[in-house]
Image: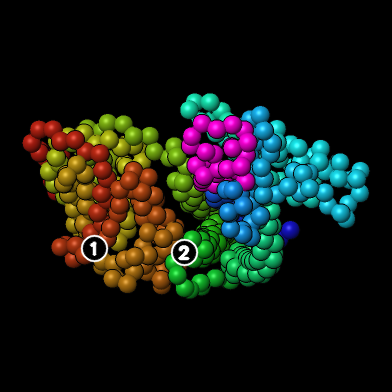
Amino acid sequence: MSLRWRLAAAIAAILILAVGITFVAIYRGTGAQLRGQIDRALRADVTAFVNGGVPRSAAGPRAVEAAGRRYVTAQPFQASARLLVERVTGGGIVTNQPEVLGLARDPDESAARQRAENRQTRKLLVAPLGYSTVDVVDVGDVRLLTRVARLHGRPVAVVGAGEPLESAERAQQSVAHTFAIAGSLTLVAALVASLLVAGRLSRPLREMSAVAARVDAGDLSPRFRSSGARDEVRILADAFDHMLDRLEDAFSRQRTFVSDASHELRTPLTVIRGQLEILARDPHPSPDDVRRVERLVRTELARMQRLVDDLLLLAQADERDFVHPRDIQLPQFVRELEEGIRPTADRRFEFGEVPDGVLRADPDRVAQALRNLLLNAVEHTGAGDRLSVTVEAPDGQVAFAVDDSGPGIPPDQRERIFDRFHRTDVARNRSGGGAGLGLAIVQAVAEAHGGAVAVAESDLGGARIVLTLPGFSSGRRARPAGPAGA
């Protein structure tokens, strides 16, 4: 069964259960209410019979019987055919329905049938005191109330009143008949309505299934673009669209990444193959040619090795164990970074004061990110240009800022410089400079630590890149990390 039919069946089942419970409650309630009314009427009749059909003074059975007949004869006609009966102690039976008790013979019935009916109706005369229900032939169930009438503490008669339960049974049958008709019509209407409602509710899900099938087939373009009330289905559809947007973007970035990585690897491979082919054409190459080819091959292999290492590093950035934080003595860490970077380039490095304290981070990853920032600044400056490194610790964080006096980064490029393989200088070919992964690694390290990296314009005239990391605990007052200047 489809979801639409299952929803319709569930709604119909719930409705049937609700109607059934309502029917049982009304059916039984109607019967109980009518039987209660009958019991109250019987109690009033018996009380009135005792008060009016039993003499107040001492008298024998004949006087009691005569008083009972006078009372019965004086009762007005009642459409309910209520039974009144009095069994006088030591006397006869007084009743307003002698044919019911078999005291009068029906001329249309045979003697045998009359005797059989009499045996059934005699149950009315031997019924126990209080309320009871007696099954009488041709009458059905009769509700009976019997009570002992006393005179000066002595029982003189057993007075009873009875009424057939046919009216209550007819009322219950009427309720059942009404519920059968109304319930059937309601069930049909509810089934149709539930099909419409279920179809409306399941339509977005069917659309999602169709979109999911197209996505599974490789088409990432379809979207729901749902409108209307922001209910659970709308939230699910919006989440699905957002997921597809991110998935499409991820696939696009992956294709771009693979294309760029292939291009970056193809360039050194082309250079190596070309140099080897040139060397192979000469059956007796000179030692200088061999050494020249060797240098070129080693250089290109080193570039390939760096590229592969960076790609592996970025691939590991999504793993949980990418960083292994531990306590870093910040002044000593910055001093060692300064000592390692100064000999690598002919630049005027300036390191400011470093807050004294401990940074909870992965020292290898942080050092790698800062070296990438410094090497990026070196690549965009010339000999003798200024490079400034400042360290601040606001609100339990550490902000490493690297400023250079190079050409800077255009505002329209600042949001993209952290993309993999992105270069701000589009005119520069792939044979010069880096592969465009250094700043992407910086961003990966920052995000892995719960920090961030941002770029702005520097007071030195070039670019200013700030790496912010959380987890700093301050110590003594700040002190210089090392000598300033180159």
Nearer to me, 378 or 308: 308
Work out which residue is located at the far top of the displayed protein and give it.
Answer: 154
Q: How far across and how far down the image is residue 363, in percent?
A: 32, 36
> Could you say whether the residue bearing mark 2 is in a helix, strand or loop?
loop
Q: Is residue 346 left or right of residue 110?
A: left
Give me the residue at 37% from left, 69% from top.
Answer: 425
Answer whether residue 24 is visible to the viewer in this image: no
Q: Nearer the viewer, mark 2 or mark 1?
A: 2
Q: Is residue 346 left or right of residue 92?
A: left
Q: How far across and how far down the image is residue 108, in percent?
A: 88, 55
* Residue occupied by mark 1: 456
Work out whether 232 lies above or below 340: below
The quadrant holding residue 340 is top left
Q: Where does the N terminus fall, quadrant-wise?
A: bottom right
Query: How is colour applied across the structure in the image?
Result: rainbow
Nearer to me, 323 or 55: 55
Nearer to me, 457 or 70: 70
| Circle nearer the N terminus (2, 1) | 2
Give me the residue at 31% from left, 66% from top.
Answer: 414
The quadrant holding residue 210 is bottom right
Residue stretch in magenta: 42-69
**Residue 110: mark in rendering:** none
Give me the residue at 86% from left, 54% from top.
Answer: 107
Q: Magenta includes 88?
A: no
> Could you say whether the residue bearing mark 1 is in a helix, strand or loop?
strand
Main SS of residues in magenta: helix
Q: Is residue 141 left or right of residue 384?
A: right
Q: Magenta includes 53?
A: yes
* Residue occupied by mark 2: 231
